[in-house]
């Protein structure tokens, strides 16, 4: 038993002794070696010793960070590119200083908060921060963009630079936007939404940040509750701007009355709201209410004659109406001449809509499959010459 107690005392003494000597251990070491030394000792260090250790990392890395800052500044003036790796000492110095400040402002063994390193680190590193913004903007590599943006964001949120940023941080919104962009490329939708929502407060990046936010939020719509939460978020962002999307989604989750109310309110507010009529048309089309859909889609293209997708939807609705009518009026696979004329009249209407799509989108850039739909209608009408012309156009 005595031996065990003695061993424990020796172990405790060794840990305490090592902790007290952490700065001495790190002196003379290269930065990477000093990082390893500190990391291996962290679990046995007090907050005060951790602060000293991280400050020692700043001391070791600062000359390289200062040189990198000067080199990058010169390169920017000369408009020459700098590899992202050159920024590493600056990022390291900022991150180490933030960690130092975190522990430096914790109570010491006597229960007092007596920071020792804040002023010196804040004064010598404050100017380094802004140089990260251009680099984060220019790099297309998601990992590198995030590496730079996170260093800026973490330093901005740290009390270390509170005095320097007391008037506000003019570039924080940019850094948050770059982080959102990086996370989006990594397909981390939760983090994308988190940083995009913060970046929206910056007017210069608001519009693009909003696009990232809206897109990221749509990636996780697995339940009705998810969709309702998303709809609330869209409304909070800009209910008027996202009216069509909100109404359409409410319809998709079975909230038909609420969807219709949103659309009708939008039309009452602006009788020429083409998107409100377009969504009303889509809702009716999804319910196979062809006449109602055609009515709303016609109103849409009356407001915007170049709305190609709606002309295509008109063709879909008219052709579906025609084929449904053919089935209703046929008996045992046969149809009277009179009823056949009724069907063809509707299908000719559909052909006219598809021809409008052809006029607006001859190269099939907006809607690739309109030729197939139009050829189907011409075949149904018995107009084989026109159908063959489309086949030739398709190279079949």
Image (tube, rainbow, N blue to C red):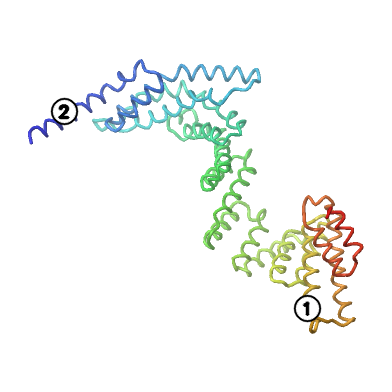
Q: Which of the marked residues, 1 or 2, is nearer the chain's N terminus? A: 2
Q: Which element is circle 1 on? A: helix
The residue positioned 60% from the left and 28% from the top of the image is 134
Q: Position of residue 65 (x, y in %)?
A: 48, 20
Q: CA distance from mark 1 to mark 2?
A: 94 Å
The answer to whether the residue labelled 1 contacts the one labelled 2, judged by CB atoms less than 8 Å apart, is: no
Residue 104 placement, left or right of 248:
left
Q: Which residue is mark 1?
A: 327
Residue 10: percent from left, percent from top:
16, 28
Residue at 31% over, 20% down? 23
Secondary structure under the numbered disc 2 in the rendered image: helix
- Residue 22, by quadrant, is top left
Vertical arrangement, residue 330 with respect to residue 345, above or below: below
Residue behind mark 2? 10
- Quadrant for the C terminus, please: bottom right
Closer to us: 3 or 165 = 3
Q: Quadrant of the N terminus?
A: top left
């Amino acid at each position: 038993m005595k031996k065990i107690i003695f061993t424990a005392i020796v172990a405790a003494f060794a840990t305490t002794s090592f902790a007290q000597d952490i700065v001495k251990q790190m002196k003379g070491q290269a930065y990477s070696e000093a990082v390893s030394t500190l990391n291996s000792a962290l679990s046995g260090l007090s907050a005060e010793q951790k602060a000293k250790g991280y400050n020692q990392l700043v001391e070791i890395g600062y000359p390289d960070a200062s040189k990198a800052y000067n080199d990058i500044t010169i390169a920017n003036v000369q408009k020459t590119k700098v590899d992202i790796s050159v920024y590493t000492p600056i990022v390291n110095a900022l991150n180490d200083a933030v960690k130092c400040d975190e522990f430096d402002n914790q109570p010491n063994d006597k229960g007092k908060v007596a920071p020792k390193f804040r002023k010196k680190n804040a004064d010598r590193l404050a100017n380094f921060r802004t140089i990260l913004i251009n680099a984060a903007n220019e790099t297309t590599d998601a990992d590198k963009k995030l590496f730079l943006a996170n260093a800026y964001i973490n330093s901005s949120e740290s009390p270390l630079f509170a005095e320097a940023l007391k008037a506000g941080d003019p570039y924080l919104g940019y850094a948050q936007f770059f982080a959102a962009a990086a996370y989006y490329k990594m397909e981390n939708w939760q983090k994308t939404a988190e940083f995009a929502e913060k970046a929206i407060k910056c007017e210069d990046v608001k519009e693009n940040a909003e696009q990232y936010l809206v897109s990221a939020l749509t990636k996780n719509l697995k339940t009705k509750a998810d969709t309702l939460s998303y709809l609330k978020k869209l409304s909070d962002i800009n209910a008027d701007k996202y009216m069509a999307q909100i109404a359409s989604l409410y319809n998709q989750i079975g909230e038909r009355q609420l969807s219709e109310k949103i659309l009708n309110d939008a039309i009452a507010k602006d009788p020429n709201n083409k998107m409100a009529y377009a969504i009303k048309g889509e809702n009716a089309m999804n319910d196979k209410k062809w006449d109602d859909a055609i009515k709303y889609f016609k109103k849409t293209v009356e407001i915007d004659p170049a709305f190609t997708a709606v002309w295509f939807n008109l063709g879909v609705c008219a052709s579906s109406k025609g084929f449904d009518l053919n089935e209703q009026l046929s008996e045992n696979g046969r149809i009277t001449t009179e009823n056949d004329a009724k069907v063809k009249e509707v299908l000719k209407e559909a052909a006219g809509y598809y021809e409008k799509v052809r006029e607006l989108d001859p190269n099939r850039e907006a809607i690739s499959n309109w030729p197939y739909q139009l050829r189907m209608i011409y075949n149904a009408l018995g107009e084989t010459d026109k159908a063959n012309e489309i086949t030739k156009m398709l190279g079949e």
